[in-house]
Image: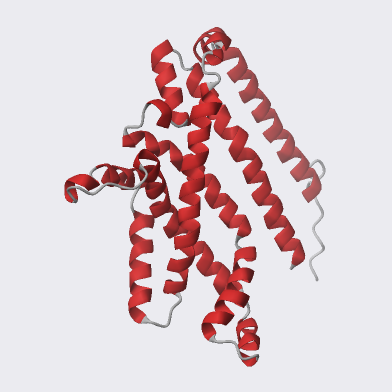
Amino acid sequence: MADEPKTAEPGRARLSPRKRQRISRGVQYAVLTIAFVALVVSADWGSLAQNFAQPDVAGQMLPELFTIALKNTVIYSVGGFAFAFVFGLIVALMRLSTVGPYRWLATLYIEIFRGLPALLVFLMIVFLPLALPGFEVPGGTYGQAILGLGLVGTAYQAEIFRAGLQAVPKGQTEAARSLGMSAARAQITVVIPQAIRIVIPPTTNQFVALLKDSSLVLFLGVSGEFVELTKFGNDMASTHANATPILVAGLTYLIVTIPLGYLAGRLEKRKGTAR
């Protein structure tokens, strides 16, 4: 005799996937709420305010916070980015070249500067005059900072450009060649402009990364009119024996990086929609 179909036992009815998901979400909200309440209750708000939120200390950072520290941070970052943009494109073209030595040199450069910590690159720039007596980086402190950021940024930007160049359909090059263009002219007038448009979103993210890496300029021993946000915040914190300047410097970074990150996201979304 055929087995009769099993029926669910009373009181043990299976929950639907939607109900299970709703219960799981409710449990997660409850855990997060408990954790938040515990944090609020256990935190020493008076001590935090005393050490991280002193309006009078923050006020003493003005106007140098913007006229010197933020200005220098932007100069270092934009200079390093311009360096990385130009040389990153050159290294990317070398990486894709049919000439073996070009490919090897580009690959070696990318692997070295992507593998080294950025801090180590800045320290090597500091000691560069010892290895090359009499040599000085043009531009003094600004030149050293831009060189350090540019060397590191070039390696990452080269990979971004390489991906963009490879994303351009080969038919574009073939069409340009069929019109009588040389390989070099087709690359410059057809392929590279399209690749630049493709890599705008990741390039924006790369600029944000360089902006944050500009904090490493402090290891060049900058002072006075050459300080950037991190160095300025650290010096002010040491002067006042209070961490408020560190918090203010961090918030100033966020004022710049959050809009740029949002812009990169919008560009990426627009690029995805256009496909």
> For the point 46% across and 76% down, which residue is it?
96
Q: Place residue 102 in its image quadrant.
A: bottom left
Please indicate whether residue 68 sits to the left or right of residue 8 in the image. left
Q: Residue at x 55, y 87 (%)?
A: 182
Where is residue 214? Give x, y as percent.
45, 40
Q: Nearer the viewer, residue 132 or 115?
A: 132
Q: Is residue 241 visible?
A: no
Vertically, is 63 above or below 204?
A: above
Horizontal and vertical percent for residue 138?
Answer: 34, 47
The C terminus sits in image quarter: bottom right
Name the image quarter holding residue 109. Answer: bottom left
**Residue nearest the viewer, comparing 202 with 64:** 64
Q: Is residue 245 left or right of residue 197?
A: left
Question: The N terminus lies in which quarter of the figure?
Answer: bottom right
Coordinates of residue 181 in the picture (x, y in percent) = 59, 87
Residue at image coords 71%, 40%? 24
